[in-house]
Image: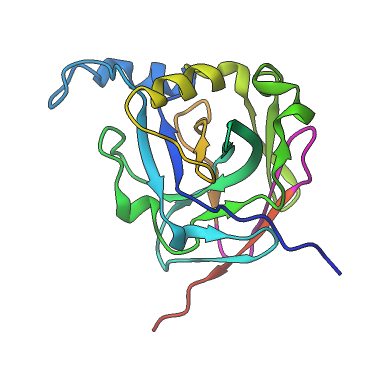
Amino acid sequence: MNPVPWMPAGTVYGALLNFRREHALWAPRMNDAPYKGAPKAPVLYIKTANTFTPAGAAIALPAGASVQASASLGLVMGEGGVAGAVLFNDLAIAHESYYRPPIKARCVDGFLGVGGECVPLAALGGLDGIARLQIGLHINGVHQQTTALADLVRDAATLLADVNEFMTLRSGDVLMLGTDCLADGTRPLVHPGDTVEITAPGFSPTLHSFTQEVAA
């Protein structure tokens, strides 16, 4: 019997602008209205429970939508701190707003592909070991992107500490470290019929297929 795929037991949060390349691309606009300055605290968004798709399942894409795939790693909270980590495919409809993360673009049904296992933090070498990880994203078996966690603006320990200054992460909650963009500022696009695989050392591959949403 196959084990039941791991699924989040709490709230899943993601961090925006937490990779150096994307932060640098947005830097010229950070002084524009309404904020007129770079963010001083982590910019977070929520992936609601309706977005959770277990490992190996299919994700339906809305008709006509341009959907981006993004590899991410999430820290899973336990009773005494970080219990482990999970790979995610954090999907979103392409959009321009990052200071005010659009719910309609990020929280579409099924738009968080969840890895099948939570790997204990100790097995990854702790938070320092996570900083050395590289995450691969493949579409239909073709490598599209490598995300190096060494390129984070706030590494895992720093992001966790900064978030804990203004909110409490409870056991079962997940804090995703962020997603990186490609060199041109975009992210890989997925289409009906595609299969996306996300890989990292120490983790089983995270695989999701994509279908066309059926009109009601």
Residue 131 at x, y = what percent? Answer: 65, 19
Check residue 161 for magenta coloring: no
Check residue 197 for magenta coloring: yes
| Residue beneath the point at 45% across and 38% down | 14
Residue 75 at x, y = what percent? Answer: 58, 35
| Residue beneath the point at 55% across and 22% down | 156
Q: Residue furthest front?
A: 79
Residue 127 at x, y = what percent? Answer: 64, 21
**212 in relation to 112, above or below:** below
141 lies left or right of 18: right
Magenta range is 191-205
50 lies left or right of 211: left
| Residue beneath the point at 54% across and 19% down | 157
Q: Is residue 155 visible?
A: no
Q: Residue furthest right?
A: 1
Q: Is residue 125 visible?
A: yes
**151 in relation to 45, above or below:** above
Q: Tell which of 41 and 82 is nearer to you.
A: 82
| Residue beneath the point at 44% across and 36% down | 169
Q: Which quarter shows the N terminus?
A: bottom right
Q: Quadrant of residue 135?
A: top right
Q: Which quarter shows the C terminus?
A: bottom left
**82 in relation to 209, above or below:** above
Majority secondary structure of magenta residues: loop
Scheme of image coloration: rainbow
80 lies left or right of 23: right
